[in-house]
Image (cartoon, rainbow, N blue to C red):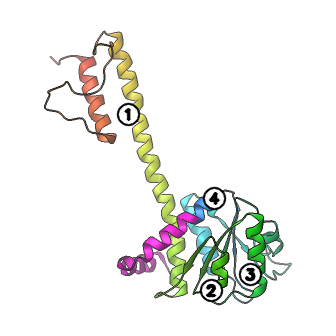
Amino acid sequence: MDANQVATLRALLAPTGWLERTRAFAQGLRSATRLRGGLLVVGTPTEEPWHLTAHLDEESRLAGIPELMPTLVRWNPPPEAPAHLRVGLARLEAARRGETLFVVTPSTAPVPLLERVSDARRIGATIFALDQGDPELDSLAHEALTVENVSFGAAQHLITSACGDLGEMDRAEAREFSIAREYGLATRRLTAAARERGLGGNDGGYSGYPPAGGNNRYRTGVRGLRDRVARLLDTVSGPTA
């Protein structure tokens, strides 16, 4: 499934609540995983979540979220496989607090998997589960998402896409913070200049608010900062010729 197909799927499922569910699930994965390389993805001995792991790896790299770069844990990795494809069950035994075990299985989890999930939880790892209705697995999970009304493959794509969206949200917040910091610095510099010239209110400074009784209304946020800087600049510069 390519990006266009995922976008079409998301548009079709928008009224169903699935986008909100997968977004919350992705946010939970990120919040629970505090260590780089600490997102462990495991399936059953007969169904390994290759597809989800590959897409999650791609989305996390593009989004710049290293804590969501997954480690695929395999039941019987061949010794000749590349290093990232021969991580065995011993990795689950080494799981610790700050790491997440993400169990992905479209079928009922076998007892050996349940035992290892229980052990990882006891050690302190956070357990997430994606299944099609598995009471025993869900009872061990801190957070579980049961796939209904969509295919299991589609649900996996929605989750990995939601993980990629987290990176875009981070970039938007960073841009807003950068703008606010820029205008905050400008305000402090102009306020200092106003004080040096003896302008301002009773305290010798400039409050940045319009005079009482004026027609202007103070607005919060970045727009308000721009208004304050503009008014302060007019005060410092004096009237134009």
Measured Cα–Cα span from mark 2 to mark 1: 53 Å
Q: Which residues are magenta?
A: 1-28
Q: At which x and y percent is residue 205?
A: 33, 16
Q: At which x and y percent is residue 72?
A: 71, 74
Crowd around label 3: few <14 · some 14–19 · many ≥20 (10 Å): some
Q: Earlier in the sequence, mark 1 or mark 3?
A: 3
Q: Earlier in the sequence, mark 3 or mark 4?
A: 4
Q: Main secondary structure of the magenta part?
A: helix
Amino acid at circle 4: Pro
Asked if residue 146 can be seen in this view, the reply is: yes
Q: Earlier in the sequence, mark 4 or mark 2?
A: 4
Q: Nearer the viewer, mark 4 or mark 2?
A: 2
Compared with 167, 176 (above or below) is above
Residue sitting nearer the eye, 73 or 54: 73
Residues under numbered marks 4 and 2 in contact, where contact means CB atoms less than 8 Å apart:
no
Measured Cα–Cα span from mark 3 to mark 4: 28 Å
User: What residue is pinned by disc 2?
Assistant: 134
Compared with 118, 235 (above or below) is above
Image check: 67 left or right of 23? right
Tell me the element at label 4. Answer: helix
